[in-house]
Image (cartoon, rainbow, N blue to C red):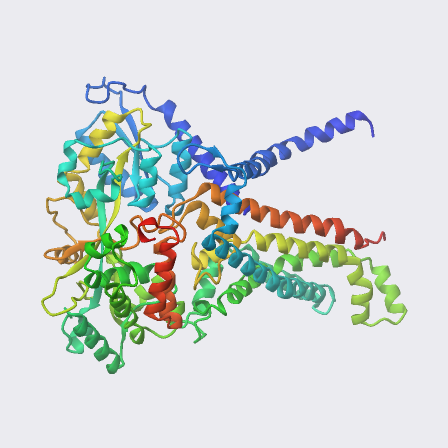
Amino acid sequence: MNRAHYRYFLVFTLPALAVYVVFAALPLVNSIWYSLYDTDSGVARFVGLENYVYLFTNPTTSERFWNALTNNLEFFAIHLVVEVPLGLLLAALLTSGRLRRSTGLYRTLLFIPTTLSVVIVGFVWRLIINPLWGLVDFPLLGDERTALPTISLMSVWQYVGIPMIFLYAALLAVPNDVLEAARVEGSGAWSTFWRVKFPLIAPQFGLIAILTYIWTFNGFDLVFALNGSAPGPNYSTDILGTLFYRTFFGSSGQLSDLDLGATVASVIFLIILVVTAAYFGLLHRRLRSYEL
Amino acid sequence: MHAIRASVALVAAAAAVLTAACAPSATPVTTGGSAAPAAAGEKTVLTLGSWRTEDLAMWEDEILPAFEKSHPDIDVKFAATNTNEYNAAIQSQVDGGTGPDLITCRPYDVNRSWIKKGYFEKLDGKPMLEAFEPLALDPWSDDAGSRYCLPTAAVLAGFYYNKDIFAELGLQVPTTQDEFLAVLKKIKDNGKYTPLAVGSSESWQLAYNGLYSIGPVYWKGEEGRQGLIKGTKKVTDPDFQKAFDAFAAWKPYLPKGFESLKYPDMTQLFTLGKAAILPDGSWNINQVAVDGLNVGVFGPPTDVPGGDRYLQEMPDMAIGISAASKNKAAAEEFLAWTATPEFLELYVNKLPGFFSMAKQPVTYTNPLAQAFADLKNGAKLTPRLGLDRLSAGTPPFDDEVWRVLQLMLNEDLSTQKATEELQKGLASWYTPQQ
């Protein structure tokens, strides 16, 4: 490859890069920058890490933060344990050949909820489980113990199509001759899947797991649509996204605090960055991808 | 979070673009103000920032044309931001020098912080202030008593009731707390209707339509509220405990699964004729009467027969002149117009459920709105307990009230524990309570 080629590369990536820098990278840097200032008095004053110290030492803000983080971990865990394996199962069924001609129909049906607006998903599910007009007698969303799992499962219902379609594409890419060889060697469907197909799609499986982590820690919309910015009962469905929103924009009884909001945002960014970096640095490279 | 961050950036960008787009289209700034007659075709353009996006059509089609008819040299643009993002949007706009000429003012602490940041032009000594009682102006004043915004509207809270159900069961409108509980018990014993259409999923309305409505009679309205603000009273005092007890007494009369019922569910339960009483705010007037339901309204019950009546009147919005505006004279002209009966009558009748705060009485064309307004006669008015000063720190008192009220209904948290928690939270940062 000569120098001219590199110049083309640069020219072609520049528009995307510019958009990315202006709308993603700069605001990110800017918000980290904000978190080091105090603007409450009207004049920006550099305070170093004071906002972070306040966030973690004030009894109320730190309690809300740890509560949101714990809830967010639970939110993620439910997605990881239910959504990702379910997506794998559905993808395996879709590629198993047992559905014959209806594969396309199922694929479409299972993917449709993903394309719906969260407001609709939240509204429909809220009606379905409404104790007055719905099917369930128990106030699932009104009980501290069941509220977060309920919301998580709504989100799983909505987004299961994403890991499914992702792993489905990966499974389709597994070459037929490998599978035929396995069959000739006398391998059944179960062992073919776990010993031949799954190792081949392991990198994609790992990727979807880490993407689920990123999505759930960036999560906000469904909780906000269902429970607003002070998600109850007793903050039991408060996740980092809603905590940020409440801090940054304020609520009816809470002043909007731009600096502290930026601080929360930066902490969320850090939480995502560290785990994602650790995953790619330590784990992902160990998942061998086979050249076929 | 990226989505949020991106949307923040977008809002800011959109705001910047909007104001940038407005500036060149506006004719040169009339430095002498519009008091000097502008040349034909030359108009001063004012922007009015607001959080009520839903009112855009009303302002553009009804109110602003009425103003522009008598003030042909001023062109007012209604620039609304989403309610939830309004505070942050105004702050970033004003700090960035692109704020509107006229800013709609949030009551109490938010506005106090804006006053401190120097967002507003002082209104002291202006004749337009004389249309209002001091109590109406206080929510938008600084600690020294200087005025910065002119009140536009307040909301009230009370109890809607289904007149047909009351007639069917032979019930009288209750005036005392004992009568109120007796009515609830009768409806429950009859078994056909839910006595109170209340759900606890949205905790804000437990405070705004519940405790802050029935409580003032026990803490004696302004006396108790100012006592908390000055630090002479505590939330754990018997007066406040009695109010929390009165709220807890509602629990047996709530619908099944109330823990997960939202505000629209409550309204629906009432409008479908399945519940007899709905504790609610005046802003819901249109919704409760939408199905042609035979609805009446009564105020919070008194403590003893013939005792003082109290009513929650919550200042909702006011308008102030931005200190950074280049068209202050025109802005002042507009503001003075919002104190006239012409504006107020237009406004409150286009938006039933909102009430004028001016001294001069206003006629309401909506009968339910008029019934609500009549409740003000002879009643001691008081705003929501938790929003003035007590929520300007962490934890905000108001948010904590929402939370403990929800726990009182959902998990039987006792009045004792609830008030102790509130007092502890308040004492952790609010100096007068320390």
Quadrant of the rendered image containing residue B31: top left
Q: Is residue B54 above or below residue B303?
A: above
Q: Tell me, yes or no, if residue B124 can be seen here.
A: yes
Q: Is residue B208 found left or right of A178 in the rendered image?
A: left
Residue found at the far front of this picture: B434
Q: Quadrant of the N terminus of chain A?
A: top right
Residue B72: which quarter of the image? Answer: top left
- Taking depth in this image into account, of B412 and B348 the one nearest to the observer is B412
Q: Position of residue B383 (x, y in %)?
A: 23, 53
Name the residue: 25% across, 36% down. Answer: B148
**Residue shown at 62%/66% (left/top)?**
A82
For this orientation, the residue located farthest to the right is A185
> At which x and y percent is residue B140?
25, 41
Can I make out residue B203 in this image?
no
How many numbered marks does the figure carry?
0
- In the figure, B153 relative to A169: above or below? above
Horizontal and vertical percent for residue B372? Answer: 17, 57
Residue B233, percent from left and from top:
26, 57
Residue at 42%, 32% (x, y): give it: A43
Q: Nearer the viewer, residue B4 or A198?
A: B4
Q: Nearer the viewer, residue B209 or A53?
A: A53
